[in-house]
Image (spheres, rainbow, N blue to C red):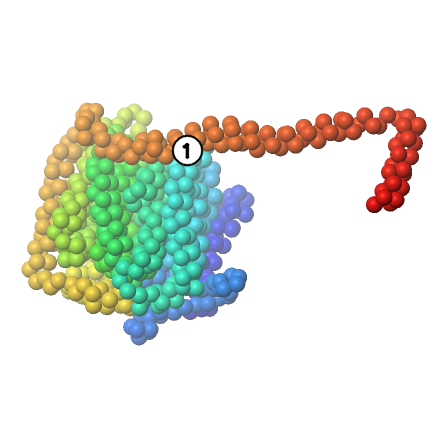
Amino acid sequence: MQNYFLSITVLPLLGFLINVLFGKKIKSEKFSGWLSSIFVLIPFLIGVQALFEIMSLPEDGRKIVINYFNWISAGKLTVNYSFLVDPLSVVMILVVTGIGFLIHVYSIGYMHGDEGYARFFAYLNLFIFAMLHLVIADNFLLVFLGWEGVGLCSYLLIGFWYEKKFTGDAAKKAFIVNRIGDFGFLTAMFLIFTYFGTLDISGFLGQIAGYPVNNALLIAIALFFFLGATGKSAQIPLYVWLPDAMAGPTPVSALIHAATMVTAGIYLVARTSLLYVLAPYASNIVLIIGIATAIISATIAVKQNDIKKILAYSTVSQLGFMFIALGTLSFVAAVFHLVTHAFFKALMFLGSGSVIHGMHEEQDVRNMGGLRDKMKITYITFLVGAFAISGIPPLSGFFSKDEILYKTFTNAGILPYLLVLITAGFTAFYMFRLVGLTFFGKPRYNSEHIHPHESPRTMTVPLIILAVLSAIGGFIGLPHVMGFNALEHWLEPVFKNSYALINLNHPESEHSSAVEWLLMLVSVLVAAAAIYISFRKYSRQDKFAEEKGFGKVLENKYYVDEAYDKAVVNPIFRTSESFFWKIFDVKIIDGLVNGIANSLSKFSIDWKKLQTGVVQDYAALAITGIIGIILYFLFA
């Protein structure tokens, strides 16, 4: 494996370099797009090969560390450039490269004619390169390299159309907010190296195995890691960058929201699962933040009108579901929902891009309607994604969401379960509000200027593939009452120690099969009721009144951005302008520099008076100097 596995990261980097250095010289758009796509497809095939190689190993030995070279040696710090290949990293490789490849192919048609075509594919390849480092790194420093890499690429891709001010503002917002989370990641690394003397993931987890539960140091490390995760995976209070990331091209939204950047925080917590088992206080905070994020963002999505903003808040909510699973120590359920969410959310984002493309860049769902006859493939595939995320059986979202609901009920209690169930109902409601307003009812657009049409094959074929995956992807994680949970069995070696400790300290409550079937039935009924109410109301709506009361609050996203502006942004701006610029910079820094320059200037002018040009004056000065030297040696 060592001989070929390095190419899994080298090929996307090579695609980036080719497009950056020679993109403008390549006259064929398709060549640039397909080249970048192939450099993501081959890593996917390598991931498939790694899957079979790991499967051939004994269950207890399904872990391969590939060490390529010594990266950093400084004092006690030694970091190798090494990859960890195990069931969890293989799942992430397949998700990142598989969904990433489909998004690359989709972009060939979507970005056609754009002046920055080659540059766009260069950024996409660099994004895949960074994300792959994040999910296969054997040490936290290499994880952080990928962590920062996807942050940089998100800035470049969100602000891709940099000539528009709002895209630049959105890119800066994403970059700055993520730096707050990165502070948490860095602090956790500092603590790990200080107290454990290593940055190797396996070495760290091996050392903490004997620590007592709720040790203060482990709680601190877990919370700092979670701070990093809240930045990358858009949880309260650092979620505000993700909806604004819609300013970038739609394939960017699909890449960031479905398969790559936002899953980084989920992966980090899952990879360090033993840490959170040993720090239940931190796990409870993860659960609380996950529930709050899921329900708040779901309610906001109910009143949004931008098709991509609705999906953006949906992503924030679904990430909340994943953190709920992590907070209940149901790590397999979190990874399961990560995978299924990658299928149906990539499908819906690319579907929204197809709608926007066919509607000549219109994004307001109030100005759509009746598109199901004009864009049949987009409509059918989008509908599959909507049913999947709503939790309708037998589509993928039903199985993963039901697993989270069941684990919340058994591990957290009835109140958290009810909150998550209500959030699931909101999910179905806002998704079919989107479907009803976009594809049903009378056309509400100007038919003289807008002529909806189906997208080209490069865009519709990825939609069909993702629709199939959204439909059947859930069968890899069947509930135990239905059959064999293949994903749980596959990931068992990764979480074996964590689950052993959970069962030792907190034996899971025994529930009959009837309880599990009942919970499934309740979740389906809630979703079906929400779909019926939403579709009946919005599939026929053709007039829109201004929102009032609480609806206005939801439309304005609880005024969180405005509150951040007043509490954080504006005070910093005013302080920077009134003190750091006008006083500290201008009067102190510039004043000190200019004062030294002026003093030297005056001093030189005074000394210049000695240069009279009269020989007698120079002779007198010379004689005075000689006399001074003689007197010094006589009396010193």
Task: Write the residue at 37% across / 36% down.
Answer: 247
Say which of 175 and 114 sits in front: 175
Q: How many other residues sit within 10 Å of disc 1, few (<14), some (14-19) or many (≥20)?
A: few
- Pick out the residue farthest to the bottom: 58
Residue 312's image quarter? top left
Residue 283 picture location, percent across and down: 25, 55
Task: Write the residue at 12% across / 51% down.
Answer: 414
Does the image show residue 282? yes
Does the image show residue 95? no
User: The residue under label 1 is which amino acid type?
Assistant: Ile
On-image quarter of the C terminus? top right
Residue 223 picture location, percent across and down: 32, 52
On-image quarter of the N terminus? bottom left
Residue 313's image quarter? top left
Q: Which residue is mark 1?
A: 572
Say which of 226 and 320 sits in front: 226
Residue 604's image quarter? top right
Task: Write the residue at 37% across / 64% down.
Answer: 204
- The secondary element bearing badge 1 is classed as helix
Say which of 614 and 445 sits in front: 614
- Pick out the residue farthest to the left: 514
Residue 3 picture location, percent across and down: 46, 68
Residue 269 picture location, percent across and down: 31, 56
Q: Is residue 296 left or right of residue 271?
A: left
Say which of 305 and 621 sits in front: 621
Above or below, 249 against 324 in this view is: above
